[in-house]
Image (cartoon, helix red, strand yellow):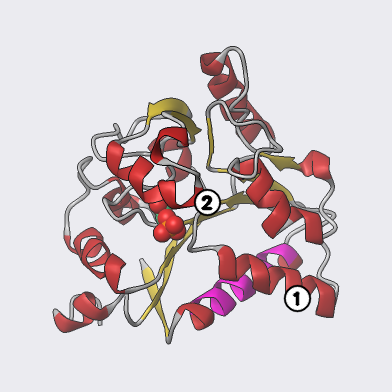
Amino acid sequence: MKIIEARNYEDMSKKAASFIIEKVNGSSAPVLGLATGGTPLGTYRFLREDHLNNQTSYQHVYTVNLDEYVGLSPDDDNSYTFYMKKELFGHIDIPASHTHLPDGMAADLQGECRRYESLIERLGGVDLQLLGLGMNGHIGFNEPGTPFSSETHVVELTDSTRKANARYFDSLSSVPAQALTMGIATIMRSKQILLLVSGKKKAGILAKLLSEQPNEDIPASVLNMHQDVVIIADSDALSIVKERSMAF
Ligand code: PGA
């Protein structure tokens, strides 16, 4: 694992955007695995600004997102489809037909999970998967205890994840109870992984992920078994790691 220290959230976001832009400019048909949540917002802002100022083109880029809520329509402003349009796709020149998220409105959710796995395979796999880190070590919506062998599946969201995400909804009861997510095995098949971590509140879980043997109680610990992981973390997120001089 390669760890890049950023000064703060802005610096982390800028470094992450540069990393992605390099991949976009350096490949003929890159497949980007994208993430939602608070962490990548700054990265997407830098990508928008770069597209505007430097005309980086995304016409040759394909994307697959990690996850989507079950039961929210694409124009619901809490759906991840809406988030991606608002934060990125609506501002760059990527063809809409190149962008993919699991369909949380599918009548047959199991069938949708299989379709999503075959779609990723048909695209030739993910070249670069962007990840955030949950407070409990989750990646995507893969909560503690999710088998490392899991592929795209339906999850019952835990109370802690629903509470953490309730800030975006009118009330806790309107946070969906289920989501579709790429599984741990799906994520691990990505050729390269870029994990972004920011803030003091993530310092404990980042230290844990870097010090523990891979185990299913900390989903992100699986990343220790991947050949090509880059972590961009700000100094707040790295504070405990540095205290214990685990990685430096
Ligand atoms: P956050 O979420 O980026 O909003 O902190 C990360 C996650 O839960 O995966």
Residue 58 in view (yes/no) = yes
Q: Is residue 19 magenta?
A: yes
Q: Quadrant of the N terminus?
A: bottom left
Question: Residue 90 at x, y = what percent?
Answer: 79, 55
Location of mark 2 (residue): 191
Q: Identify which residue is drawn at 56% across, 20% down.
A: 114
Q: Is residue 95 above or below residue 112?
A: below
- Crowding at mark 1 (Cα within 10 Å: few <14, some 14-19, many 20+): some
Q: Is residue 80 toward the left or the right of residue 54 in the image?
A: left
Residues shaded magenta: 12-24
Location of mark 1 (residue): 50
Residue 192 in view (yes/no) = no
- Crowding at mark 2 (Cα within 10 Å: few <14, some 14-19, many 20+): some
Q: CA distance from mark 2 to mark 1?
A: 25 Å
Question: Residue 36 at x, y = what percent?
Answer: 54, 52
Q: Is residue 196 magenta?
A: no
The one of 80 and 138 positioned closer to us in this rendering: 80
